[in-house]
Image (spheres, rainbow, N blue to C red):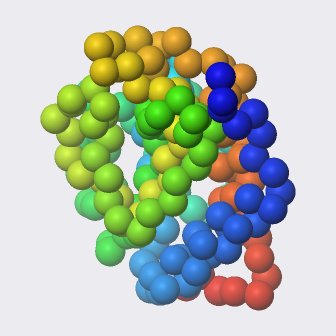
Amino acid sequence: MAAKDQIDEREIEILASKVRWALQHSVNKEIIFLCIGSDRSTGDSLGPLVGTMLKKEKIPYPIYGTLEEPVHALNLEKVLKEIYKTHSDPLVFGIDACLGDEHQIGFILFKEEPFIPGNALNKALPQVGDLHLRAIVNYLDPLSPAQSLNNTRLYTVINLAKAITKVITKTLSTEKISLT
């Protein structure tokens, strides 16, 4: 398999600087991390793993979606309503797993736009977030996308979750910037 096994420090720094820039240009918004996925599927557990890791890092921002309380297809709309009711003018930072081509496994994508979770599985879910990080955890088998998520290596998911957590903690711990 042509997957990336590790994300190196240089890649983490580059990604952290892109995220930092985007957050700096979103002043006066409360940052909310929305980590989407289910711990019942290896590939889909990326979001809850990141949420759990971010909570352990004690970042000073609300985090929705952990292994203990995952945000998934069945409760996503309810959680989104809660976020917008509880937080005034939030900047929702989405984190999710996704599927791609075999040579893309292990890559982390950052975009300054909403995304639709569950797209590969043809789920009708609402658009999420103002910006997002998604990690390609496995290749998309067009005949069985759900099987692609279930057959994902836990090693890959854990390494990607650690890398995303590192990107976010580096972004937020930089003393040179103010995010508010």
Taking 92 as reference, is 95 left or right? right
Residue 151 against residue 159 in the figure, above or below: above
Residue farthest left in this picture: 124
Residue 16 against residue 3 in the figure, above or below: below
x and y, in percent, of residue 142 in the image:
31, 21
Q: Residue visible at 75% across and 33% down?
A: 5
Q: Residue visible at 41% across and 12% down?
A: 147
Nearest the camera: 7 or 54?
A: 7
Quadrant of the rendered image containing residue 28: bottom left
Residue 24 against residue 132 in the figure, above or below: below
- In which quadrant is the N terminus drawn? top right
x and y, in percent, of residue 10 in the image:
81, 62
Nearest the camera: 123 or 148?
A: 148
Residue farthest right in this picture: 9
Residue 52 shows up from this direction: no
- In which quadrant is the C terminus drawn? bottom right
What is the number of callouts on the image? 0
x and y, in percent, of residue 139 in the image:
48, 27
